[in-house]
Image (cartoon, rainbow, N blue to C red):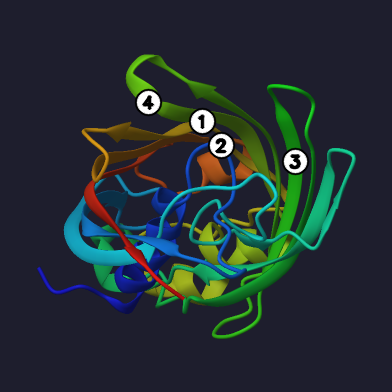
Amino acid sequence: MQLSTSHVVMAAAVVGVLASSPAGATDLFGSGPLDVQVGGLVIVTPKYEGSKDYDVFGVPFAAPAGSNELGIVQFRGPEDIRARLINFNGFEAGPLTGWRFDRDESDSSTLNGLGDVDGGLVFGGYAAYRLGFATPFVSYSHQVTGDDTGGLLRFGVEAPVTMIGGVKMTGQIGATYADDEYMDAFFSVNAAQAALSPLGAYDAEAGFKDVYIGFSADVPLDDRWTVKLLGQYSLLIGDASDSPIVESESQFFGGLGLTYKFTIDR
């Protein structure tokens, strides 16, 4: 299948998620040799938020390898690429950026008459506090290009675990709060849209839109080859789950990749 712009951008962001070890951030700065991973990734994702249908596609990628808990850049998802500028006694904070995906009317017959919603660049910030094995965090992202689809506030806890055989895995659980603009863009049906659609008018208000649980994992095959795994399950709740555009409240996301590591002198 032909990849959309959203798929390409998402793949780039997920590359960052997988290139970072589950324990934390990738240190992209500093001197000395730089370890690099190259490989391929297969991604499974809903066609749009609330869709019952999924897209499956593969992409090649290249990204820095390894991790450093004192590193600067962290990748947590397509809409959550963080820069750790404050790091003091377990507290960390900084700006974040990423990409919010679009929604095309052609993604499903359910969307007939609703028009397209343009994705775009997001900016925001995050704060987290390391409490031994767990790290609670909060982040905010707001779209600044394309359509104004508002902001998302995420709350969650991450917990890294090193398992037998050097397998490194991080579990994550949390919830997402969406403002009025976001809910209107992705879950509401206004009067003009209802006139062109078989769906009735629906006004989705600000509130918690989902709860989620996920994981990422590095499974080393040897010193050079590593299998990368990424998965997340989200359950739409509140006004989001009641929206007539939602075909399924259960939303799954997954990635499977294989990488090869080599070193570049710098």
What amino acid type is highlighted by mark number 2?
Ala
Q: Earlier in the sequence, mark 3 or mark 4?
A: 3
Distance from disc 3 to disc 2, alpha carbons, whole Å, reads: 14 Å
Q: Is residue 213 visible?
A: yes
Mark 1 in CB contact with mark 3 (< 8 angstroms): no
Residue wearing tag 1: 170
- In terms of secondary structure, where does tag 4 sit? loop
Whether residues under marks 2 and 1 lie with C-beta atoms below 8 angstroms apart, the answer is yes
**How many discs mark residues in the rendered view?**
4
Circle 3 residue: 137
Q: What is the distance, in whole Å, between disc 3 and disc 4 at their CAs?
A: 24 Å
Residue type at the position of mark 3: Phe
Q: Is residue 251 left or right of residue 219?
A: right
Q: Nearer the viewer, residue 169 or 89?
A: 89
Q: Residue at x 72, y 32 (%)?
A: 135
Q: Which mark is residue 167?
A: 4
Residue 182 rendering spot, x and y as whole percentages: 63, 63
Task: Judge the density around disc 2: few (<14), some (14-19), many (≥20) Cα neighbours within 10 Å.
Answer: many
Q: Earlier in the sequence, mark 3 or mark 2?
A: 2
Mark 3, Cα crowd under 10 Å, few <14 / some 14-19 / many 20+, is some
Residue that badge 2 annotates: 23
Mark 2: secondary structure:
loop
The residue at 45%/59% (across/down) is 16
Q: Secondary structure at mark 1?
A: strand
Q: Nearer the viewer, residue 151 or 36?
A: 36
